[in-house]
Amino acid sequence: MSASIDDLKKERERFVAFAFAAAELFFEVDAQGKIAFEGGAVDRIGAKPGQSLVGQNIYDHIDTDDRDVFSALVLHLEHKGRIGPIPLRFTSGAGRGVALRLFALRMPADADRVFLALRSAPLGTSGLGEEDVSAETGLLTKDGFMKLASATMRDNPTGSNLYMTAVEVGGIEEAEKQFGPEYMHKLLKRISAHLRTLSVDGEIAGQIDERHFAFLHRTKGDGKQFESSLAKVDANVKLRAAYSTLASDFKDVAEDQVLRTLSYVLNQFCAGEDNVNFQSLSTAYESMAGDAQRRVVQMHNMIETGSFNIAFQPVVSLLNGDIHHNEVLSRFDERMGDSTPLEVIRFAEEVGVIEEFDIAICKKAIDYVRKMKKLGTPLTLAVNLSGRTIESDRYLAALMGVFQSAKDVSRSLLLELTETSAISKLEKAEAVLSDLKAMDYRICLDDFGAGAAGYQYLRAFNVDYVKIDGDYVRDMNTPGYRPTFLLSIVRLCADLGIKTIGEHVENRFQADFLRSLGVDFGQGFHFGKPDFSPKTN
């Protein structure tokens, strides 16, 4: 028996030695926070020179805004055994606070004791601004969370056991109705303390909206741990959680696509499903997360094997009815489920597969143009390019290589820049489009007028065509319709020497109206539905 006690003493001494190798302060506290042992410069957190803090409560020396974090830490030590580094603010006793990084350990032989090691270190979320962090809760905003999660996953090698958990907390709104907004804010702070404690470095936890949260962590069971901890947050409020945990290292998915897939899952999680009750949310979202991963892998396989089809829809001159060119449209098999082609493309953009798909469909279009040219039936095709693709650091060289090798048919290709994904690097995009123009490719802005960014693109880019968003054409059928905005687009483009295309033309009235306004070309079911054979006359 004495031998085992001696062993435990030696083990504790070793821990103290190791703790001080990387720490400035060391404490041993009991379950209530009473300090049983101290070491180091304890005057940094309020001890008077030559005096001890032993017998005092550690909570009295923690900043009031961070006491909830320490309480959560003590609770979660039962689950994790070791936590840290966690940023924690202490009072100095001189009206000033001191911020430290805290490591906590619970040893099996001392289940009622917590060992704390503290050291100075820069606090705060590196690379983020004040707008990315909530001063009220200490949680990151959605954008701040995704920025820091991205940097953390990028700096951690594949297989480092990083997980992202999205959480929906129920009961917050009921607490506000019953006890008022001030009580609700205090409740939210305690919830935030648990999220921060379980997250990587005590920092990578965010509030996505009023009841949705997310945190990055290293133990797969942390989502379940957070769910169980909600029962201990407040005796007066019954909180409940639905959560979904997703590993950050997807198999067969490139690292730069992982974050966008996680972001997609997070957005879907927060969107909710009307036909799913709260009790079944966790199961539903786990299924959704797994489905997202499967769809990413399926899209990769489809792109690699080229097992998707292209259809063609004619674009017709409104002046004489001649076919000017055909737009290339994507068509998918049963592996994409019941999703429409537009839904598949949007999914590809959101999860970071669109760049590879754009390259693949450009290759198909080029091959088709060359084949028709050999058959003596030359034609012009328009192919879509996502804004993400021309901004991509990873795929841009490959894309430009495809176009460089196809300069023999450049006049037979029209590149439509889609506005479904906003372009943030205008100068880079302008340089890319200028290079394409130098190769004799023509450029079209798709869905012009759908958002304010279109006018910014028109000023920045040297384009040949503008495709007017279909809503302007559909609106023609409404009583009292006035073509003010549509006419301003047409006149602006005419002044700039840019040809215009009206899409979603469904009937002769719309075609005639567009022609009367000066629109050059039309596209829609009135001229022809998408077909696997292009119209050439």
Image (spheres, grey):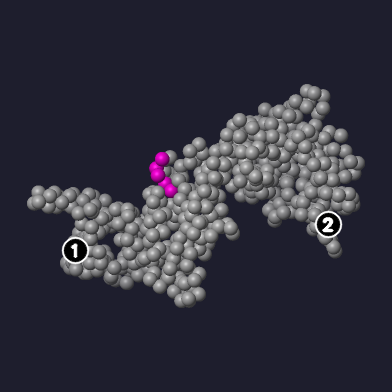
- Does residue 160 show up magenta in the picture? yes
CA distance separating discs 2 and 1: 80 Å
From the image, which quarter does the C terminus lie in? top right
Residue positioned 77% across, 47% down in the render: 467
Residue 10 x, y percent position in the rendering = 14, 50
Q: Which mark is residue 36?
A: 1
Secondary-structure class at tag 1: strand
Bin the neighbour count of mark 2 within 10 Å (Cα to Cα): few under 14, some 14-19, many 20 and up: some
Query: Where is residue 396 shown, x and y percent of the image?
Result: 60, 37
Who's the residue at 68% across and 53% down the image?
A: 453
Question: In the shown orientation, is residue 417 left or right of residue 225?
Answer: right
Quadrant location of residue 472?
bottom right
Where disc 2 sits, the SS reads: helix
So how many labels did they put on this image? 2
Figure quadrant of residue 413 = top right
Residue at 47% of width from left, 62% of height from top? 169
Mark 1 or mark 2, which is nearer the start of the sequence?
A: 1
Residue 363: percent from left, percent from top: 67, 31
Q: Which residues are magenta?
A: 159-163
On screen, 109 above or below 339? below
For disc 2, the marked residue is: 476
Q: Main secondary structure of the magenta part?
A: loop
Name, please, the residue furthest toward the top.
Answer: 374
Looking at the picture, how far across and down is residue 87, in whole percent?
A: 36, 59
Mark 1 residue type: Ala
